[in-house]
Image (spheres, grey):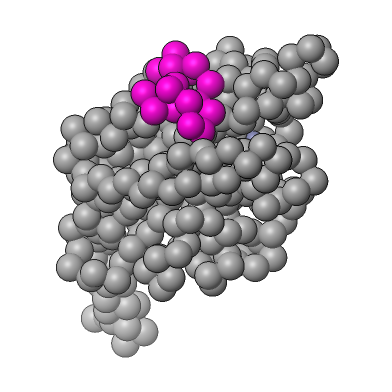
Amino acid sequence: MIELSNIFRILAFWISVILLSLSCAGSKSNKVIIPPFDGDRAFEYLEKQIAFGPRVPGSTNAENCRQYLIDFFTGLGAVVDTMMFTHFDKVTGKAIAMVNIVARFKGSGSDENQNYLLSAHYDSRPRAEYDSDTTKRMEPIPGANDGASGVAVLMELGNLLAKSRCRVNIDLALLDGEDWGRPGDLDEYFLGAKEMISDIKGKYKFALVIDMVGDKDLKIYKEELSLKYYPEISKLVWETAAGLGEKAFIDSVGDAIYDDHLSFMTIDLPSAVIIDFDYPYWHTTLDTPDKCSVQSLQAVGQVIITLLYRL
Ligand SMILES: [Zn+2]
């Protein structure tokens, strides 16, 4: 004979077993396979950009690097659009030809409205105004971290998105003229982003700007303005990083940084910048690949690819 209470206990046990197996089956069918981000390959892309020399807007180096990027993304099977525009320098009056590049990767889902934007700037700054050697302050910077690191991450993301599509549509924008301006005057910064916003209003769910993510000593804080206006994006990024045990992403608020995300915010596009602004070689001729590391690109790339495949 079995006591009634024991029957209930046995029943409860089997019900919990059935429920557990059902929930496991459910989670199994929803399991997303995240491709591994290759930091070594991303670092090669960083070095490749530097090999062109400084990519100052309007220069032959910039043109050569641009063609390299267009060929790269076209080779991956992305739809690649270029947007040309002219900037008239406020001081010299000179017309500078600039070009944005957007590589589009269609997702496997059928929803045409699931569009997300990732951007980095491929131009490098024309003046190294913080160089300790005052004779070098009018020279262009190599821009290994300030520019090339973000582009390198987007290039490796392109490799992964081309091989196995994620559910949503991803546009990778390589913007020109981010770093053209002179200190104290924001008018001539973020020129590519300012150009891009003219025809993307309402198109994207959110935008992530990737800049200065190659520093060997990588510590990425939540950027103050991103967090203030669109806290859910920073939350998503830092929670993904925490889930991966990625310690370069520090869960506290850092400085307010002016970057391309501010231009996106002017059209109410939810945006955040991922940036480590604590970089001693910023806007100097010493911003070279030896200050950057495979591990830093790897850390940022893996967090972003994980986040994208879970959207
Ligand atoms: Zn810069």
* Segment tinted magenta in the rendering: 48-65
Examine the structure image and report whether residue 61 is included in the region drawn in magenta: yes
The location of residue 109, given as percent across then percent down, is 20, 63
- Residue 158: x and y in percent read 30, 39
Q: Nearer the viewer, residue 241 or 289?
A: 289
Towards the viewer: 92 or 158: 92
**Residue 182 located left or right of residue 272:** right
Q: Foreground: 216 or 58? A: 58
Determine whether, in the image, residue 265 is placed left or right of residue 80. right
Ligand 1 quadrant in view? top right
Residue occupying image coordinates x 63% and y 46%: 189
Residue 39 found in image quarter: top left
Residue 176: image x %, image y %?
Answer: 48, 41
Q: Is residue 20 visible?
A: no
Placement of the N terminus among the 4 image quadrants: bottom left
Q: Residue at x 23, y 65 (%)?
A: 26
Q: Is residue 86 above or below residue 226?
A: above
Instruction: Give the quadrant of the C terminus.
Output: bottom left
- Image quadrant of residue 42? top left
Q: Residue at x 58, y 59 (%)?
A: 263
